[in-house]
Image (cartoon, rainbow, N blue to C red):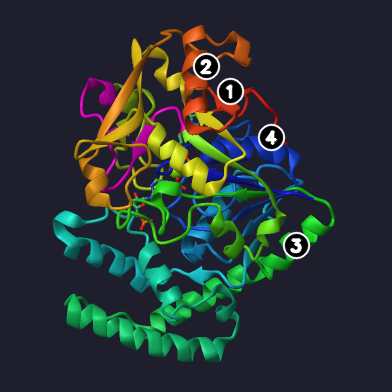
């Protein structure tokens, strides 16, 4: 019966993949609703370690149907490769379905993502250069091509001809780049169409029918709330709705169907790419966290910027998503630190703020106000019960709970499925 959402509460890479893989055991369906292969969700389970870019992290259970919804932008080459790799590693993909309304990332999207970034110079967003922004621009601009379009060869050719004519004018006249060949793209994408055809469905109907049958559907968020196109640190955001609202339009799901919403928070903060991050550290602690936690992007390999937990951002995320509860990941990363800081407010122009300003240049000028808590300096990665955590670690997570005004359901103490402390069951 219920749809349950799992949403990134910070700047992405909070450990959504781990949490989805953990929860998926008890559900019937896992559905991705936004983003594309800018996402990189790491799953470490008895089958091995996997980096998922498009396929939902529920694929490791035989009984789970996996949906790539209409709100996702699909690079067919990446999806087909991911499917092949999963099959090679013994995973079944016969319950994986892709919306026939999902927009396709085309070669010009990838090219333009890079060219646009270069033309931004010092104010580059630091995108993943996977073509995400340009693809969503075309979706909104009504120039997009959708997965289902590939099955109607003649209309597809006509559409591609007119869109490519326009894109080639931009490529050659604005960026002085080489034009792309219609025949090459058409042939390539027709082949992708044949390969994708068995996966294409009206997935909104499948989600609805699953809920009607009384099944549990997990909604797998991508990116994070602070990268949301509306509520993130604009313009340093991704091009889609990463917060829970995106799940409705990105799957064709009524909001009344969403029963509960869980935010995934790292026990500290990271960010890849540009844009303000008030608690960012540039000292040995940042280096220690980065190396200890291997904070390098799953998709691009870029070093992640690291900093203290920002409860201003956390509270904001909890409010605009309406979190029912939270999952705190990577607590074990903090095991070695003698003391920890939590940002409880910002100082800007002599005033104290308890919510992030909507303007990025103002947010960049905010000075974090910290409270300091003692560290626990012992290994938590083997612990499985809240009561067994060192008292300082318990105080730390309790304080996160208070400051985000969001009850903690799960504490993660390692990348593996079983490295988890369940405080309150989610499912
Ligand atoms: P996602 O994009 O939100 O799914 O997160 P990523 O997979 O990009 O990044 C999270 C990283 O943290 C991955 O390498 C995970 O394997 C790892 N991870 C998840 N939970 C934990 C945890 O509790 N402790 C540690 N040490 N690593 C974790
Ligand atoms: P997951 O799902 C972290 C960031 C990029 C860049 C900005 C815009 O793994 O949490 P884009 O390519 O989307 O136009 O880039 O958004 N970004 C992510 N950062 N995790 C992600 O996904 C991200 N997806 C996009 O680094 O700053
Ligand atoms: Mg990631």
- Report which residue position mark 2 lands on: 381
- Report which residue position mark 1 lands on: 419
How many numbered circles does the render carry?
4
Report how far apart the C-alphas of labels 3 and 2 lie in the structure. 39 Å
- Report which residue position mark 4 lands on: 426
**Does label 1 or label 4 sit earlier along the sequence?**
1
Residue drawn where x is 41% and y is 58% of the image: 230
Q: Is residue 82 above or below residue 105?
A: above
Please tell me how crowded label 4 is: few (under 14), some (14-19), or many (20+) other residues with Cα within 10 Å: some
Circle 1 SS class: loop
Report how far apart the C-alphas of labels 3 and 4 lie in the structure. 21 Å
Report how far apart the C-alphas of labels 4 and 2 lie in the structure. 21 Å
User: Magenta region: which residues?
Assistant: 266-287
**Does label 1 or label 2 sit earlier along the sequence?**
2
Circle 4 SS class: loop
Callout 1: CB less than 8 Å from ligand 1: yes
- Report which residue position mark 3 lands on: 208
Q: Tell me the quadrant of the picture where the C terminus can be found.
A: top right
Instruction: Check residue 173 for magenta coloring.
Output: no
**Does label 3 or label 2 sit earlier along the sequence?**
3
Q: Main secondary structure of the magenta part?
A: loop
Callout 2: CB less than 8 Å from ligand 1: yes
Instruction: Determine whether label 4 and label 2 are within 8 Å by CB.
Output: no
**Does label 4 or label 2 sit earlier along the sequence?**
2
Instruction: Determine whether label 1 and label 2 are within 8 Å by CB.
Output: yes
**Does label 3 or label 1 sit earlier along the sequence?**
3
């Amino acid at each position: 019966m219920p749809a349950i959402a799992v949403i990134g509460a910070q700047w992405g890479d909070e450990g959504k993949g781990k949490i989805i893989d953990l929860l998926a055991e008890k559900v019937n369906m896992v559905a991705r609703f936004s983003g594309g292969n800018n996402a990189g969700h790491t799953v470490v389970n008895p089958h091995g370690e996997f980096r998922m870019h498009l396929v939902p992290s529920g694929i490791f259970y035989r009984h789970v149907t996996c949906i790539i919804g209409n709100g996702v932008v699909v690079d067919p080459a990446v999806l087909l490769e991911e499917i092949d790799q999963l099959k090679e590693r013994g995973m079944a993909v016969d319950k994986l379905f892709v919306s026939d309304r999902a927009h396709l990332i085309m070669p010009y999207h990838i090219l333009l993502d890079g060219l646009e970034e270069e033309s931004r110079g010092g104010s580059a967003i630091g995108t993943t250069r996977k073509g995400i922004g340009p693809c969503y621009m075309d979706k909104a601009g009504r120039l997009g091509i959708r997965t289902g379009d590939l099955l109607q060869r003649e209309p597809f050719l006509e559409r591609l001809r007119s869109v490519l004519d326009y894109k080639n004018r931009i490529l050659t006249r604005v960026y002085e780049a080489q034009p792309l060949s219609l025949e090459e793209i058409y042939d390539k994408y027709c082949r992708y169409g044949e390969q994708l055809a068995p996966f294409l469905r009206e997935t909104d109907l499948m989600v609805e029918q699953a809920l009607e049958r009384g099944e549990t559907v997990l909604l797998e968020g991508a990116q994070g709330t602070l990268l949301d196109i509306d509520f993130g640190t604009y313009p340093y955001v991704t091009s889609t709705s990463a917060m829970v609202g995106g799940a409705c339009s990105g799957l064709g799901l009524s909001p009344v169907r969403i029963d509960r919403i869980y935010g995934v928070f790292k026990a500290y903060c990271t960010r890849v790419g540009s844009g303000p991050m008030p608690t960012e550290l540039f000292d040995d602690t940042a280096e220690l966290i980065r190396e200890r936690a291997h904070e390098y992007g799953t998709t691009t390999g870029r070093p992640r910027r690291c900093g203290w937990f920002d409860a201003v951002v956390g509270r904001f995320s909890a409010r605009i998503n309406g979190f029912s509860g939270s999952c705190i990941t990577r607590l074990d990363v903090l095991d070695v630190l003698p003391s920890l800081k939590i940002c409880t407010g910002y100082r800007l122009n002599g005033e104290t703020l308890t919510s992030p300003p909507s303007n990025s240049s103002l947010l960049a000028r905010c000075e974090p106000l910290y409270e300091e808590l003692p560290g626990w300096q012992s290994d938590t990665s083997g612990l499985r019960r809240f009561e067994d955590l060192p008292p300082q670690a318990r105080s730390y997570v309790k304080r996160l709970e208070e400051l985000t005004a969001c009850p903690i359901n799960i504490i993660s103490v390692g990348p593996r499925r079983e490295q988890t402390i369940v405080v309150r069951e989610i499912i």
